[in-house]
Amino acid sequence: MRKTKLMVTHPEVTSEELDDFVSGRGLIRMGLRIAVLQGVIDKAPIDQLSRRHNLSRQGIYDLVKRVNEKGIKGVEEEKRSGRPSSLTPEISKNLKEILLQPPTSQGYSQSRWDGPLVRTYIKEKHDIDIGRSQVNNWIHSIDFSLQRGRKKYSKADPEKQEAFVEALRKTPKSAT
């Protein structure tokens, strides 16, 4: 095996610094990057590091370049771009205003907003087709939450219910 010319040159990045950096952080990818960097610092051959850590040679070169430019921060996970959200600020504002009103004001026959109805509204008014979970995410992102109605028994005596609740509150915690 031949020696490599690849070197970590940033003064902040040493084997001891990498050990300190990894303690207390549990990201697996970061641990892999640190192991690769420690191999580079120890002058291990790139092809050996590549096979051992299942990382391409170019990936190792890119990692070392990033660490040499940014220092220890180059090891951390960078934000990755993803698909932009369909929830624009205008739609968010509109949805917030609409959810404060009863669904009947929008021509729906339901008396309360629920997930499927919000989904229908978004599809009809904004021509955006999203799934159930995404509807919940959107509702939470505008600081709302879906509430479920509770059954109320019409034959129940409210005074007896209140007495039961009071008795339950007076019961010691260990007895329940």
Image (spheres, helix red, strand yellow):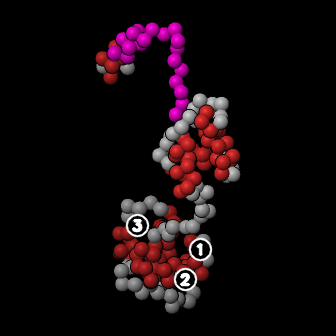
Return the residue nearer the eye: 147 or 1.
147
| Foreground residue among 142 and 124 | 124
User: Residue 12: in sight, yes or no?
Assistant: yes
Q: Which residue is drawn at 65% across and 43% down?
A: 121
How crowded is the residue under tag 1: few (<14 C-alpha within 10 Å), some, or many (20+)?
some
Q: Which three-letter amino acid code belongs to the residue tagged 2?
A: Tyr
Q: What residue would you read off at disc 1?
A: 55
Q: Nearer the viewer, residue 115 or 15?
A: 115
**Crowdedness of circle 3 by 10 Å Cα count: few (<14), some, many (20+)?**
some
Residue 48 placement, left or right of 77:
right
Seen from the viewer's position, the closer of residues 59 and 143 is 143
Q: Which element type, helix, strand or loop, lies under badge 2?
A: helix
Magenta-highlighted residues: 146-166
Instruction: Identify whether 83 is placed above or below 1.
Output: above
**Picture disc at residue 42:** none
Left or right of 145? Residue 10 is left
Q: Which amino acid does label 1 sit on?
A: Leu
Marker disc for residue 61: 2
Taking the spot 46% from the left edge, 87% from the top edge, the residue there is 7
* Whole-percent x, y for residue 32 in the image: 51, 69
Q: In which quarter of the image is the C terminus?
A: top left
Is there a contact, CB below 8 Å, between mark 2 and mark 1? no
- Residue at coordinates 61% horizontally, 57% vertically from top-left? 86
Is the residue under label 3 in contact with that under label 2 (CB below 8 Å)?
no
Q: Which of marks 2 and 3 is nearer the N terminus?
A: 3
Which residue lies under the disc numbered 3?
A: 22
Residue 117: horizontal and vertical position, in percent?
Answer: 64, 38
Secondary structure beneath label 3: helix
Q: In which quarter of the image is the N terminus?
A: bottom right
Q: Residues within 10 Å of mark 2 (few under 14, many from 20)?
A: some
Magenta run includes residue 159? yes
